[in-house]
Amino acid sequence: MLVALGMTGLVAVLVRLKGAAGVEPHSGGWRELTSADLE
Amino acid sequence: MTQVAVVGVGTTGSHAARQLTQLALASLVIDDDDRRREARVAKAVATTLGRDAIGRGLSDHRDHPDVVVLCTPAGTHHRLATIWLQRGAHVVSISDDPEEVAALLDLDAVARQHDRALVAGAGFAPGLSCVLARFAALDLDAVEVISVYTAGTGGPACARQHHRALKRPGRDWIDGEWVLRRGGSGRDLAWFPDPFGARDCYRGALASPLLLQRVFPEARRISARIAASRRDRLTIRLPMLRPPHRDGGPGGIRVEVRGRRADAVETRILGVMDHPSVAAGTMAAVAVAEVLDGRIGAGASGLADHDDPKRLLRELRRRGVRAAEFSGVPEIAGA
């Protein structure tokens, strides 16, 4: 029983630490601000 | 005869000192409890400013600095700021501890009484994060949501503060009140400017919301998250298990500001990818220049209070810290 609970807890910790893979929710990209943007 | 003093020349302070040599200073005083480090940084900056212009060890009776830049570990700034304001110096602090930043803002009356400026949170985040948020809000009629994400650390003191921040609760501004959120919770994947990429970010005791809420009290939600690795999260309740890196860079800032322009909802996303120690030191030096030029008035304030964020970003850009804007369109799932 204790072993089962321990294993469950360990798996839960690992899953929580690993998390889900993320995907960028946008298309597009980063553009450096130019002098014109900052005038 | 302008004199500036940098107190604490660790990783970030040494970058601040190097950046300050670009200002027309009569003298620059380097002060650190570690005398060897103090000597090393003084020698390095002397090559630019000249040996006669560099002083070592800030002395109460010998030195009368116009500005004191506090780059010591978080937790030491309030005492030093009080002392130097009362001695007639402007103070620029890079502390990122929210409780200390709040305490620094509470020195407003002291700063005004002595007709001096106290700039709180003039580093990476808060600091550069505040400038980016203010810039992003320029074209909006009303700001509704501000989300700040940061990744990376400066020197060892910054890494220790990062560790502390993750295990302490953070304050989010939600619908007109501060709400305590558990540190290390609220995973959110944030994309930083290339090539830094994506990092999982979590809540923690972070100071940016505090400084932004002063300026955007009408916002419904202001929050901040900080990137953490799996090991950071696993050891969140433990002391740091190994000495931190000398420089925890590179890192990044991502600031999302959502608001209204005319009748439309608009979101602007600004970011920076740089070494946090370099960007924080540069930000502090730019803040010093603004104080010396009289563009930051008497009293305690943050950099979000500055009414010309474009000017600050121009100055940062000139010094090599370059901001970027994410321009994209939402993708329809499955499309």
Image: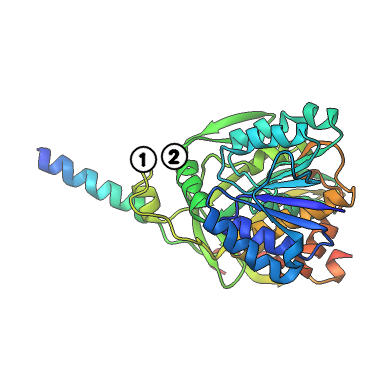
User: Which numbered dot is residue B237?
Assistant: 1
Amino acid under disc 1: Arg
| Above-or-below relation of B205 to B138 | above
Residue depicted at x 66% and y 52%: B123
Residue B22 seen anywhere in this rendered image of the structure: yes
Q: Position of residue B53 (x, y in %)?
A: 76, 61
Dot 1 falls on which chain?
A: B
Amino acid under disc 2: Lys
Q: Nearer the viewer, residue B305 or B178?
A: B305
User: Which numbered dot is residue B120?
Assistant: none
> In the image, are marks 2 and 1 on the same chain?
yes
Q: Secondary structure at mark 1?
A: loop
Residue depicted at x 72% and y 63%: B19
Dot 2 falls on which chain?
A: B
Q: Position of residue B178 (x, y in %)?
A: 62, 30
Residue B327, located in which quarter of the rendered image? bottom right
Residue B333, located in which quarter of the rendered image? bottom right
**Could you classify mark 2 by the number of other residues whose Cα lies within 10 Å: few (under 14), some (14-19), or many (20 or more)?**
many
| Above-or-below relation of B308 to B24 | above
Residue B172 seen anywhere in this rendered image of the structure: no
| Above-or-below relation of B96 to B251 | above
User: Which numbered dot is residue B167?
Assistant: 2
Residue B41 horizontal side relative to residue B162, left or right: right
Do the residues under discs 2 and 1 have CB atoms within 8 angstroms?
yes
Q: Nearer the viewer, residue B289 or B30?
A: B30
Question: Where's the C terminus of chain B, which quadrant?
Answer: bottom right
Residue depicted at x 72% and y 28%: B106
Q: Position of residue B108 (x, y in %)?
A: 78, 30
Q: Nearer the viewer, residue A3 or B208?
A: B208
